[in-house]
Image (cartoon, coloured by chain):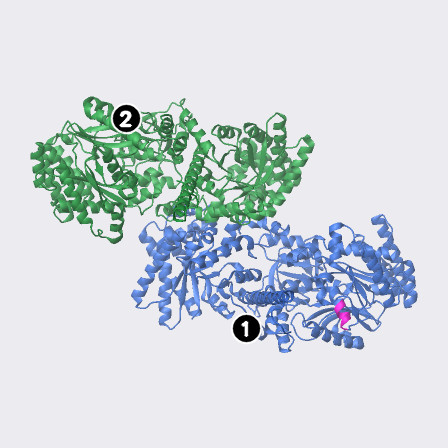
Chain colours: A green, B blue
Amino acid sequence: MPNPLVYYFGGGQADGGREDKALLGGKGANLAEMTRIGIPVPPGFTITTEVCNLFLRDGAYPRGLEDAVHAALRRLEADTGKTFGGDDPLLLSVRSGAVVSMPGMMDTILNLGLNDATAEALARQSGNPRFAYDSYRRFVQMYGDVVLGVDAKAFEARLAAKKRARGAALDTELDADDLRELVAEFKALVRERTGRPFPDEPETQLWGAIRAVFRSWNTQRAIDYRKVNGIPDNLGTAVNVMAMVYGNMGEDSGTGVAFTRDPSTGEKRLFGEFLVNAQGEDVVAGIRTPLSIEQMAERFPDAYADLLRTQELLERHYRDMQDLEFTVERGRLYLLQTRTGKRTAQAAVRIATEMVDEGLIHEDEAVLRVDPRQLDQLLHPRLDPTAKPTLLARGLPASPGAATGRVVLTPEAAVDWAGRGEAVVLVRSETSPDDFHGMVAAQAIVTCRGGMTSHAAVVARGMGKPCVVGAHDLACDEGAGVLEAGDGVVHEGDWITVDGTSGQVFLGQVPTVAPELSEHFRRLMAWADAARTLGVRANADTPADAAKAREFGAEGIGLCRTEHMFFEGDRITPMREMILASSAEARAAALARLLPMQREDFLGILRAMDGLPVTIRLLDPPLHEFLPRTDAEIAAFARATGIDEEAVRRAVERHREANPMLGHRGCRLGISHPEITEMQVRALFEAAVAAEAEGVRVRPEVMVPLVADVRELTRQKEVIRRVAEEVFRAAGRRIDYLVGTMIELPRAALTAGEIAAEADFFSFGTNDLTQTTLGLSRDDAGSFLPMYIETGIFPDDPFQVLDRPGVGRLIEVGTREGRAARPGLKVGICGEHGGEPRSVAFFHEVGLDYVSCSPFRVPVARLAAAHAALKARKIDEAAAQNEVRRRAGAAAEAPAAVSGD
Amino acid sequence: MPNPLVYYFGGGQADGGREDKALLGGKGANLAEMTRIGIPVPPGFTITTEVCNLFLRDGAYPRGLEDAVHAALRRLEADTGKTFGGDDPLLLSVRSGAVVSMPGMMDTILNLGLNDATAEALARQSGNPRFAYDSYRRFVQMYGDVVLGVDAKAFEARLAAKKRARGAALDTELDADDLRELVAEFKALVRERTGRPFPDEPETQLWGAIRAVFRSWNTQRAIDYRKVNGIPDNLGTAVNVMAMVYGNMGEDSGTGVAFTRDPSTGEKRLFGEFLVNAQGEDVVAGIRTPLSIEQMAERFPDAYADLLRTQELLERHYRDMQDLEFTVERGRLYLLQTRTGKRTAQAAVRIATEMVDEGLIHEDEAVLRVDPRQLDQLLHPRLDPTAKPTLLARGLPASPGAATGRVVLTPEAAVDWAGRGEAVVLVRSETSPDDFHGMVAAQAIVTCRGGMTSHAAVVARGMGKPCVVGAHDLACDEGAGVLEAGDGVVHEGDWITVDGTSGQVFLGQVPTVAPELSEHFRRLMAWADAARTLGVRANADTPADAAKAREFGAEGIGLCRTEHMFFEGDRITPMREMILASSAEARAAALARLLPMQREDFLGILRAMDGLPVTIRLLDPPLHEFLPRTDAEIAAFARATGIDEEAVRRAVERHREANPMLGHRGCRLGISHPEITEMQVRALFEAAVAAEAEGVRVRPEVMVPLVADVRELTRQKEVIRRVAEEVFRAAGRRIDYLVGTMIELPRAALTAGEIAAEADFFSFGTNDLTQTTLGLSRDDAGSFLPMYIETGIFPDDPFQVLDRPGVGRLIEVGTREGRAARPGLKVGICGEHGGEPRSVAFFHEVGLDYVSCSPFRVPVARLAAAHAALKARKIDEAAAQNEVRRRAGAAAEAPAAVSGD
């Protein structure tokens, strides 16, 4: 019967197991689990997350905690044969452990229990005074920083001074006496800074550490991380107290981290790093350059063989790639942690498909193993191989993909510039959790120091951002705002390009090309397609985009923005003439010149989408967007067309709008200028007829934008039907087509029942619907929206992640009432949310027929749709099972109606 | 048993009565009713509105109609002793008659049944050939115009030519021969224009006229009128066929119109005009100047005495002021029509209150007798009595009130200029139904010809617009775009001022002053207040506005826009300094200068509203609205403040927004600049504390604008509560206050349940809610919204009349869910719809606590709220009665459970 506050593990037995993650945190649950399955783990105990929540609520420990901790300590002493604070001193590590892994975000204390007496005892006991005082130095430093709040840099400065004084390059060159002196200096520093002596009593140290772990749950960086990752704030963290094993006992000891498969490529091979004569934090912090796992195999063959066996066992047990922390103490391997390993999208895809081949997991499980949010890493452009860029620096390829941005040297600058719409690359000496918000804002990250498992590398991979670490040729001078690179300097604001796949950094903006997709990817996406029920289309305005969309698996075009065609080349001139025409004849003449161009565009798109539906949206933006703006443009246009310059200027002035977003646009244009609708629809149907004559199967869908009232749709439909009939009559050939509308104004969603009576389909335009529902202009929100997200007023950027309570409710109402009025109404969405996984999940839940997103996001949407369907199925299965159990229970209680077993 | 298609009236009996308005139209039902109660009405019959609807649906008359009409004709011949097409010829008038009176919109044929033979017979029979041929001329002219579609001007031209040839000034100077010739010329004209001879057969004439009446239901002007007046299109019109009586039988005959009370002032006296030796259309058309009713009393004493008795009887019978049409044939009075008389608001109020005093109607009925839409006529400014304006012309005071605008000479120009936001006065020689849209667009109407019952006068009174008719000194030259006035000219676009109360027209913009309200008005409003349940507040930003609001009966301030205070005088300078401040200190200094000014404003308003609630809205508009715009403004501001001009320019540029309506405004400002909220709230609470110290009872309500998410309100509330506590502590005095929010974004309405948890009250901001729900910028809608309303896409301007299906639904959802989350939540509205009667009715239905509107609209809102409550009560009563009947019916059908009667 486990104690309700403290769970013990050790000696092959454990109170808990991996099923207890909510109570023990991921780390604690896995420590218990590893203990149970016979993996060498130092014994210890876990204080539950419930204790954390009670402590944070009440500001005091719950009753019974002290006794339970004391009991666990006594058991730990018995299991290790050492005594906490005694002559053969039991030292402890104290580590946080939340339910969800939060790398680097929480604090750790090692070697707890040391004081002058136990250090001396440890030196005696181990026969290694240097080890004892190295441990003591580390403990005072960590404890002083994390628990007592003394600036870490102050300790580092004393350590650096000591090394200088001793002429030592590395920590390991300091001897026991140096370290003993350092401990005294550190303690003096603590007294000076805090006004109190460093606590010597081991138990005082322990409770201080426990309290610090609990409090670290609510540090700003932890809160930020949870916000970015959508982790609830009320989970709490457990505290793991474990007997120390020592990687710093000398050259036969060390500490390392490893992944059971390559987290970058997914290849099935042990991948990791090992730091000799060191303790855990040294590796992650990237302070010294570690051995590769292959080098470890040479120098520690027995421990390596144990590691290989252990990792094999763990992967089979957990059925997923593991991220391990281990220590070798005098040649003997101990596992300190196992958890699901973070990986790049490429690795995730490969691991998932290979695990299906290895019989470890089912195909649906493989689909769920790849996070759709991560997927577009794979779909990002890579550097154009024909480009000959100027190399700026070389480092480690920490996270694949290529990105371009302006150099920023501080996280604050990154947020600032990104807030102004600039793409930025964050360049830092090394990153810490304090840099997190800057990394979120950046397109790519570069560090001058650190290795493949350094903070920057781990976080960048998790975020799917290109990252190069350990680019030693670079030096950041934040004060001067420059990046020194050999002889030259790069200024903050200069463009650089990062290739996270090769580990190179280039000067300037280097062109990129689209990635080719692996066979693993294709297989996984086929399983995803089999699992999903939601259709996925693409937004595409050109034949090239349409072809790309099809390649990425789009099942049609959900949004073809016809206005984009008018901006191309010299088409803008007849477009402008059309807008400024003073007579019906002049307007007709200009439209007649636009017609064949638009027809060609449509023909190309229809050919590319042979057999698939293509949704053509009628002209949407206000006409002034097409007009010349500057004096020079006005003069040039007047010259080119022979229209009086002053008349052009007046016309431009007349078309100006105070709030163009809410102005004379969308179907309002087609209603006030039916001749524009006529031209566009004629171009479409003539193209459709021509395409069919070539043998292309066409499925055009005409979409009327910005409808607020069903009568707008009715009026435009009259024009569309009339022109279609004219074209069909002239061609002697009929085409099936649909006429539908965008639902992008709240009123359209609120009157969907009426509108559905006239619409073959709905497509929610969530970009504009978000703008109107929230009264939020995307163009202007930059001055306050980042602050809103930063301070938690909005959980997410509503232009990225669909706002469920507001916009989502309108979609739900519109869909329900639209379908009630017209059963079988086809309903999709074509805003940018169509490629955002959480939003896609919502669209699945609401029962839409399809989403439409940019071609590059199509695979993301396909995978997200599969996730949504599989998760819903799981929930359905769970509900069904509950129902079975309920009935079984009811049957057991009721008199048996049927005999037999 | 009445015939289902045709209803007869005559000889003191009638098939129908006033209860049959839906079937017989207003005119037909009242002709039947008058016949029943013994009033002298020529006999006739009414073809029902149902026949009209069937005819318009099928394009053919329903079966049985011909027989029914023949039967009615035979009965008419019997009752009159004349024969249709016979020797003693029965002549007919054929007039339309819709359910709702539509003056001038439908067409009339008089003297139907005349041809060469019957005209000669009539001449013989009457012994008055001139009368016979005058009637014949009129008939051919009307029939040619209305039924056969020959341009009325062509007939007028021939008539004028004939008068010239005979040296005649008036029609009456033409003799029988002249008129006979004219008939022949008119018939030749018809044959020339239509290619067919004029129909001589009386029955052919009759069926042609019936068809023309039915078709006139769907003329554009009829459709427009129904749209403006909210009359359904499917009511149809009846056709009234009546035996002719002749006002053109000589100097002992005539025709007139009269109101039973003065339609302009409401005074209880017969009011009307009489035209000797004329037929009905001559009066309304304003072609000749008629006798006043007093002159008629002198010249036709017997007929006048009959008229007095009749009008008395009719008013008692109908219990409302009547508008009569009558003819005197050789000294004998016939009533041709009675209907409820249109009246000015002033007259409506006086008539309603005096009828209560006379015991004719109940107080609630009196309240319902005054149309709230009309009421603000009373509340409009009148000319400043101290002004010394330059008189341009004098005419008849056709519709009271004063207005200023630019001269326009055509209805098209009126619509055009008004569409550009210009106030216009429409000046016409005379108006016709074709001018209706121009009259809608104009602030006031002036005609050069016509009398108090001319088209212009009747329509202008109905619309509550100032109108002067018969301003003979003016002459319109549409071609030249000038108005000739004596020696001078006024150009289209020049400003004039119309005083419809005195009948004067002035040059330029004459200042106006607020009206004083009559005792009748006060009594009626007291009855209205007793009847209504909806509270009425005012939007007021200054102590003067607040006082005005209170005078008009406002029960508090529902919206005090604090930003208006910042535009006053030189306050804009510290406001700008605050916005442009580069440091927290500079900003604090500027705010400190604004604080005392704002405190004074609040103090004045709180004093004015002693004892009543005052809702203060925090700063709402985007900051750039306060910044200088032009180069000159920028330079002046830079000079005044010593800030670098270039820096000002850059700041102005930085604050520019693409869509300010959806930008950084409302509570977004208060959240990004909490110091602004602090200053405003401090000013308010300091003012409140000071006011209470003076003995003023204050009830401040702080309103947070543009909330999209409850967390915005929470954040602002923290600031408000903190500052309030600081002020209260410093003052040693507490004030009760509320904190609420505007619901003006769709998302706020959709998440009202969440927001209500933090809000003491909601106030729907329907202006912005309309803009966002419809995606419609009020500033930009001018380029298409008039067309949308014109063509029926929108039934009304949604910024004037609340859009129920969209915005209304959000209000309903927000109110319901807000109150569900917080029972007793106070809910109001403070958009411009708060003073629009149909919208107020909706707010009553939804169960809001109050509306808030501009001070001048407060009485309109009070009356509209009373109407809504009384109508709902009537509906409730009706439902209760139906329920009683249903139960009674059920009891009758069911076996009797209880014996007895």
Q: Position of residue A219 (x, y in %)?
A: 27, 46
Task: Determine which quarter of the picture holds residue B427.
Answer: bottom right
Magenta portion: prevailing SS class: helix
Whole-number angstrom distance, CA of label 2 to CA of label 1: 90 Å
Residue B453 in view: no
Of residues A410 and B872, the one drawn nearer to the viewer in this rendering: B872
**In the image, which disc is placed on residue A270?**
2
Kindly identify which residue carries mark 1: B526
In the rendered structure, are the residues bearing label 2 and label 1 in contact, judged by CB atoms less than 8 Å apart? Answer: no
At x 53%, y 63%, the residue is B844
Looking at the rendered image, the disc whose residue lies closer to the viewer, 2 or 1, is 2
At x 66%, y 52%, the residue is B412
Q: Is residue B506 magenta?
A: no
Q: Secondary structure at mark 1?
A: helix
- Identified by mark 2, the residue type is Leu
Name the chain under label 2: A
- Identified by mark 1, the residue type is Ala
Q: Is residue B33 magenta?
A: yes
Q: Position of residue A604 (x, y in %)?
A: 56, 28
